[in-house]
Image (spheres, rainbow, N blue to C red):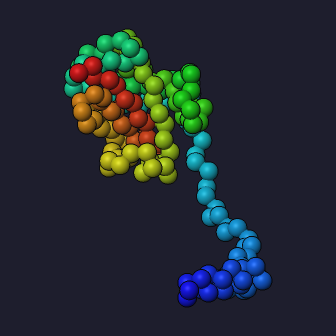
């Protein structure tokens, strides 16, 4: 019986517009000013030389273990993955001497966003690192250059 009276009191205060129960409209919270990410690099970008420790696949073709110079081309990767920004998905070429041995999609991530994309510690500015990812399914080539991070994932075929 006591519960019924309590419920009746709450219902009455809601219907009569009791100040403690009625929600009032508030203005939305102001959003912080966030600087836009830096523009994607234009044209070719030479990333440097990396050593791939084992054979991988690049663009569906075998790429043997070895040292390669990596260059990002101006060509955007198509078709675009859902949610990507156009100029941030491009093709990278792996060359030895003057011969292109393979190519793969490179994802360009601005310095300000890298912590949202990768949890590992990045290479220092101007450096690179090559990692075998969990499960040995991919090798990641990660280059930190000029305020951007370049991530290339190469299937190992293991």
Relative to the observer, which residue lies in front, 37 or 98?
A: 37
Q: Of 80 and 121, which appears nearest the observer?
A: 80
Question: 10 left or right of 92?
Answer: right
Where residue 95 sits, quadrant-wise, is: top left
Depicted 72 relative to depicted 149: above or below: above
Nearest the viewer among 63 and 8 is 8
Q: Is residue 132 above or below residue 125?
A: above
Tell whether 89 sits left or right of 142. Answer: right
Image location (x, y in percent) of residue 36: 62, 50
Numbered circles on residues, count: 0
Residue 112: image location, x then y, percent: 49, 52
Q: Residue pushed farthest front? A: 1
- Specify the quadrant that holds the N terminus: bottom right
For residue 2, say whether it is visible: yes
Q: Please provide percent x and percent y for residue 118.
A: 39, 45
- Residue 155 position within the rendered picture, expressed as x and y whole percent measured from the top left: 32, 23
- Quadrant in the picture for the C terminus: top left
* Residue drawn where x is 45% and y is 50% of the image: 116
- Is residue 51 at least partly visible in the picture? no
Position above or below: 103 against 44: above
């Amino acid at each position: 019986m006591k519960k019924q009276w309590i419920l009746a009191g709450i219902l009455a205060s809601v219907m009569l517009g009791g100040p403690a129960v009625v929600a009032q409209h508030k203005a939305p919270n102001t959003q912080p000013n966030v600087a836009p990410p830096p523009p994607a690099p234009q044209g070719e970008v030479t990333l440097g030389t990396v050593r791939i420790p084992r054979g991988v696949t690049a663009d569906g073709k075998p790429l043997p273990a070895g040292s390669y110079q990596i260059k990002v081309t101006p060509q955007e990767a198509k078709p675009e993955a859902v949610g990507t920004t156009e100029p941030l998905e491009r093709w990278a070429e792996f060359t030895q001497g003057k011969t292109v041995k393979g190519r793969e999609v490179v994802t360009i991530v601005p310095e300000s966003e890298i912590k949202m994309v990768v949890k590992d510690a990045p290479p220092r500015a101007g450096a690179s690192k090559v990692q075998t990812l969990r499960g040995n399914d991919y090798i990641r080539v990660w280059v930190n250059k000029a305020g951007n991070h370049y991530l290339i994932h190469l299937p190992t075929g293991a």
